[in-house]
Image (spheres, grey):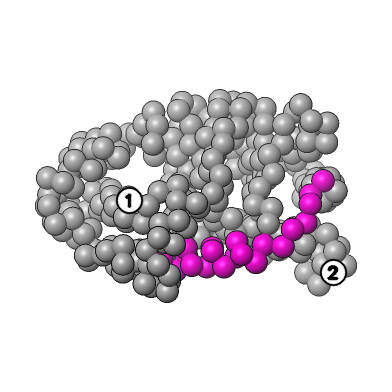
Amino acid sequence: MHYNTSYTKIVTDENLMETIQHGSKDYPFCFYYDNLSLFDFNCIDWHWHSELEFVLVEKGTVNCSVGEDQFVLPEGNAIFINSKVLHRYQCRGQGTIPNFVCLPTMIAPEESLIFNRYIEPILTSSLNYQIFSPNIPWQKSSIQIMQDIITAQNSIAAKELITSSLLLKLWAILYEHTEIIPSEQQTKHSAMLQLMMQYIHSNYPFSISLDDIARCASISKSSALSLFHKYLHTTPVQYLIGYRLKEASRLLSATEYSISAIAQKTGFENVGYFCRKFKENYGFTPTGYRNRKSAGEFMQKESI
């Protein structure tokens, strides 16, 4: 089995929705054999998608953030991420995480009894994720099924049929052990957070205040601070700076603009401040980052 090298950075739209298509219309399933050390800064950054996601930690230890929660996944553990839930992975060294994603309709067709009775309730519940530990019998069984699905991807004959049947078996175990709780408040919070994130993504080159960010979602500054802290573990202003730096890194890689021009284009009024923040966040000066990208090197950082 070979590591995925088709991409080393998650590409998202202004709402942090991943833009890559996983699988195909007639087979909405895709398997990835990822090594986090091949991604910039050992990190698969914040993103979400409509697909369900199952991740197995085959080697290393992975720091995982899902919504408002942060935790460590040791080697041998696994996790399920529900549809449309923000999440992020990072490790210090090598982190091998075979994973697969699929649309809920891969398990059962929409409007079918199985979908309405056993899939939709989990999709609309407060369950953002489920960790699987080999120390708990039903979770150990789930991990084994995940491993069987991964193994099946090397099969030439009936791979799709085997994968489909195993997914149904895996979902049955998950459903049996899930407490279904509606998530109306969480949905409302998510909508407000996405409004503020979209505002930042659209206006980052300009001067933006905390008042501006909160106003776009029709909430108070304290509520804006609370939502960013709860779900993204940062402040609106820190998120704005981080997004500006991300855009600056893209311009450093893809253009020949001067450092001062890039600072101005990404909303930094002071070049010295831009350079300090860039090195503080990425571990390299803007020039150093550009040189390493030009040389085609993968960059790693111990921790963010």
Q: Residue at x 57, y 32 (%)?
A: 72
Viewer-proximal residue among 191 and 3: 191
Looking at the rendering, the stretch of residues picked out in magenta corresponds to 177-196
Rendering coords of residue 124 (x, y %): 70, 63
Spatial CA distance of label 1 from label 2 is: 45 Å
Most prominent secondary structure in the magenta stretch?
A: helix
Please give left or right for residue 71 compared with residue 144 in the image. left
Quadrant hosting residue 244: bottom left
Rendered image: mark on residue 29:
none
Q: Is residue 295 left or right of residue 91?
A: left
Instruction: Categorize mark 2 by other alpha carbons within 10 Å: few (<14), some (14-19), many (20+).
Output: few
- The answer to whether residue 69 is visible is yes
For badge 1, the amino acid type reads Gln
Q: Could you tell whether 146 is left or right of 219 in the image?
A: right
Dot 2 lies on which element? loop
Position of 41 relative to 176 (above/below): above
Q: Give the image quarter of residue 33.
A: top right
Q: Compared with residue 229, is residue 35 higher up or lower down, i.e. above or below?
A: above
